[in-house]
Image: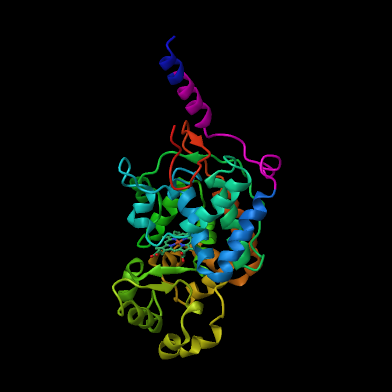
């Protein structure tokens, strides 16, 4: 065999070893020996970021959903477009406003320094989302992360458009979308409670600005319309309790006592929803189906139950697998696949 042929064989063998088939068991102590303390590193960086800006926390909670619902939890959402693949998931319109990519880069760099080539970007997303939801809820949302995921090598905007729910969806479309990933109506309602935090673009709630009073409190509609009129496509808080007091005083003064100092991940989403003060059509739609509506009432009445069920649903979300036979790897950098 020529030297060149040997070299080619070595490269092919290395690629096969590195891009292992992605289906394998996850476990809580996966990095116990290979990267002890990795969870503390992630938590340190998430806590530091949230101290400066709680909005990063909401971004991480959304990131776990947008990663795991598309090709499983494989960090495909983090891949930057390239000349060979100009339309990665993050370029999809459905991923409007997705953020915290720099924070993930910062965490990955710190983890790589400690244990090079060991911890996947996919696991980092789950650790970071867990820590963010725990910090935003003062520890009420908490769970152990099962780790050992591999990073995917495929990322397509068309997959994101197909698999992620749109804010204009009807309740039947939402139910169908969640069912395709093996999630129940109850889990749809539980996970939608994440809209207790964060922001949305006015373009994502356009339909709400003309919705009738049965669907949205007219005073809240006026508040949103006023805010959306001031710039081309500004963002508004998902939770009316995080609105600025002047806007609330001018439109829904009776709501002023309910405003809060910090974004907080709790069951207020369900109270707001029953009062018809939620941002997205998809939120309101949950009141239009019997089982979903009864779950909205249940979680409005029992915040502790929601904390527990939200934690369990995030665990389930975090276990969505890569497609069968998909290849995985531990990326060196979360924004690009490894070069062989
Ligand atoms: C049920 C179907 C869902 C729909 C239709 C939906 C839709 C949306 C939309 C349109 C936005 C605003 C995007 C923008 O305009 O910038 C948003 C934000 C957000 N979503 Fe969802 N979402 C859904 C479920 C979820 C789930 C399951 C989670 C997490 C478990 C989640 C977490 C969030 C968070 C935290 C934000 C705020 C992000 C930030 O401030 O950076 N959403 N969602």
Identify the colour scheme used: rainbow
The stretch drawn in magenta includes residue 286: no
Residue occupying the point 53% across, 82% down:
259
Residue 33 in magenta? yes
Q: Nearer the viewer, residue 174 or 198?
A: 198
Residue extending furthest front? 3
Front-most of 257 and 133?
Answer: 133
On screen, 235 above or below 247?
Answer: above
Is residue 266 visible in the rendered structure shown here? no
For residue 325, above or below residue 32: above
Q: Is residue 223 visible?
A: yes
Residue 303 x, y percent position in the rendering: 63, 69
Residue extent of the magenta highlight: 9-36
**Could you tell me residue 28's position as x and y percent?**
68, 45
Q: Report the side of 178 relative to 232 (left or right).
A: right
Residue 42 in the image: state x and y as whole percent.
61, 55
The residue closer to the viewer here, 89 or 4, is: 4
Above or below, 288 against 225 in this view is above
Ligand 1 placement by image quarter? bottom left
* Quadrant containing the N terminus in the rendered view: top left
């Amino acid at each position: 065999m020529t030297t060149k042929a040997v070299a080619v064989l070595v490269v092919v063998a290395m690629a096969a070893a590195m891009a292992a088939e992605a289906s394998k068991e996850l476990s809580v102590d996966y990095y116990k020996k290979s990267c002890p303390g990795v969870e503390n590193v992630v938590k340190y960086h998430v806590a530091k970021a949230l101290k400066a800006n709680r909005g990063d926390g909401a971004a991480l909670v959304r990131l776990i959903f947008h990663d795991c619902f598309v090709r499983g939890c494989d960090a495909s959402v983090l891949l930057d477009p390239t000349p060979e693949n100009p339309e990665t998931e993050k370029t999809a319109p459905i991923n409007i406003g997705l953020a915290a990519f720099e924070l993930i880069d910062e965490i990955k760099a710190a983890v790589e320094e400690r244990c090079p080539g060991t911890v996947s970007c996919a696991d980092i997303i789950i650790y970071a989302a867990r820590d963010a939801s725990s910090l935003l809820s003062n520890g009420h949302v908490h769970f152990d992360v099962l780790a050992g995921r591999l990073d995917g090598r495929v990322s397509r905007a068309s997959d994101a458009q197909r698999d992620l729910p749109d804010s204009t969806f009807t309740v039947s479309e939402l139910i169908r979308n969640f069912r395709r990933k093996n999630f129940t109506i109850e889990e749809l309602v539980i996970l939608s409670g994440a809209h207790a935090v964060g922001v949305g673009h006015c373009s994502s709630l356009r339909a709400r600005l003309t919705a009738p009073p049965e669907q949205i409190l007219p005073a809240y509609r006026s508040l949103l319309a006023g805010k959306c009129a001031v710039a081309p496509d500004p963002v508004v808080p998902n939770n009316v309790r995080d609105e600025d007091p002047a806007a609330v005083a001018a439109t829904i003064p009776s709501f002023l006592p309910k405003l809060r100092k910090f974004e907080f991940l709790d069951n207020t989403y369900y109270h707001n929803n029953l009062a018809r003060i939620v941002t997205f059509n998809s939120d309101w739609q949950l009141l239009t189906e019997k089982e979903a509506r009864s779950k909205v009432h249940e979680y409005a009445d029992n915040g502790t139950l929601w904390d527990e069920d939200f934690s369990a649903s995030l665990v389930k979300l975090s276990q969505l697998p890569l497609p069968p036979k998909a290849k995985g790897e531990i990326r060196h950098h979360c924004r690009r696949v490894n070069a062989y």
